[in-house]
């Protein structure tokens, strides 16, 4: 039998800064003659980001006995591009390293709808990762603060901030309160986040 080699399940992965990739998005497998190889013994695979400033990965993962692959997650630390390498005793390293892009997560509004003076309308803000295979399934590695503003606070007010919690897949809810008849829009922003603006909201008398 030829020497088995390691192989990543994909050639590249995109991760948001401050986020961790979806748990089932990336794996490393053992392969012989281009076919998956479920070895009788477990294999410990060492992983490393070429730039530890841009991303992080577990120092090692183990392919279980009688299995051909194991999943792992990539954490985005700073904006930029790098690669991930893999090695294991008795295995050739992947012919192609895993390319990593860490990008700014984008903010998106859901709601709020129109309301009345003194009325309230719920809305949510979600993080999504442009270019990712699972853009809505990456999780926060620490709390992320999102600033919320109303273009016409005399018409409607909103909470100053929403916090996306550690481990959350990127959403939180807030409430708009109608103050006076008119229109407004909401803006969500934050450091290293792509800003979002809501649709026009009407506050009726």
Image (cartoon, grey):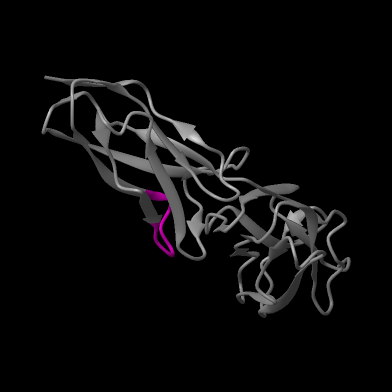
> Going 61% across and 54% down the picture, which residue do you hit?
17
- In screen coordinates, is 134 left or right of 147? right
Quadrant assignment for the C terminus: top left
> Going 49% across and 59% down the picture, which residue do you hit?
140
The percent position of residue 117, horizontal first and vertical second, equals 13, 28
Asked if the stretch drawn in magenta spans residue 2, the answer is no
> Do we see residue 37 in this rendering?
no
> Going 37% across and 23% down the picture, which residue do you hit?
199
| Chief SS of the magenta region | loop
Asked if the stretch drawn in magenta spans residue 168, the answer is yes
Near-viewer residue (135 or 102): 102
- In screen coordinates, is 188 left or right of 90? left
Quadrant assignment for the N terminus: bottom right
The percent position of residue 13, horizontal first and vertical second, equals 68, 49
Near-viewer residue (85 or 4): 85
Instruction: Identify the image quadrant of residue 110.
Output: top left
Instruction: Identify the image quadrant of residue 204.
Output: top left
> Going 45% across and 55% down the picture, which residue do you hit?
145
> Do we see residue 43 in this rendering?
yes
- Residue segment shown in magenta: 164-171
The percent position of residue 89, horizontal first and vertical second, equals 82, 80
Count the numbered circles shown.
Answer: 0
Q: Which residue lies furthest to the front in this view?
A: 154
Residue 105 to residue 83: above or below: above
The percent position of residue 153, horizontal first and vertical second, equals 30, 34
Near-viewer residue (169 or 11): 169
- In screen coordinates, is 4 left or right of 184? right
Residue 57 to residue 90: above or below: above
- In screen coordinates, is 81 left or right of 17? right
């Amino acid at each position: 039998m030829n020497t088995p080699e390691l192989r990543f399940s994909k050639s590249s992965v995109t991760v948001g800064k401050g986020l961790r990739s979806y748990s089932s998005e990336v794996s490393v497998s053992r392969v012989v003659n281009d076919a998956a190889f479920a070895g009788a013994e477990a294999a410990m695979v060492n992983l490393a980001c070429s730039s530890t400033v841009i991303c992080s990965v577990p120092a090692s993962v183990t392919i279980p006995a009688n299995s051909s692959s194991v999943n792992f997650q990539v954490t985005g630390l700073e904006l930029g591009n790098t690669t991930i390498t893999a090695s294991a005793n008795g295995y050739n390293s992947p012919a192609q390293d895993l390319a990593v892009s860490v990008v700014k997560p984008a903010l998106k509004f859901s709601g709020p709808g129109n309301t009345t003076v003194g009325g309230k309308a719920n809305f949510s803000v979600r993080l999504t990762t442009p270019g990712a295979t699972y853009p809505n399934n990456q999780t926060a590695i620490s709390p992320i603060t999102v600033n919320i503003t109303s273009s016409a606070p005399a018409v409607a007010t909103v909470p100053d901030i929403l916090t996306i919690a550690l481990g959350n897949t990127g959403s939180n809810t807030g409430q708009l309160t109608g103050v006076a008849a008119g229109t407004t829009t909401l803006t969500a922003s934050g450091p290293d986040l792509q800003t979002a603006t809501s649709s026009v909201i009407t506050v009726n008398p």
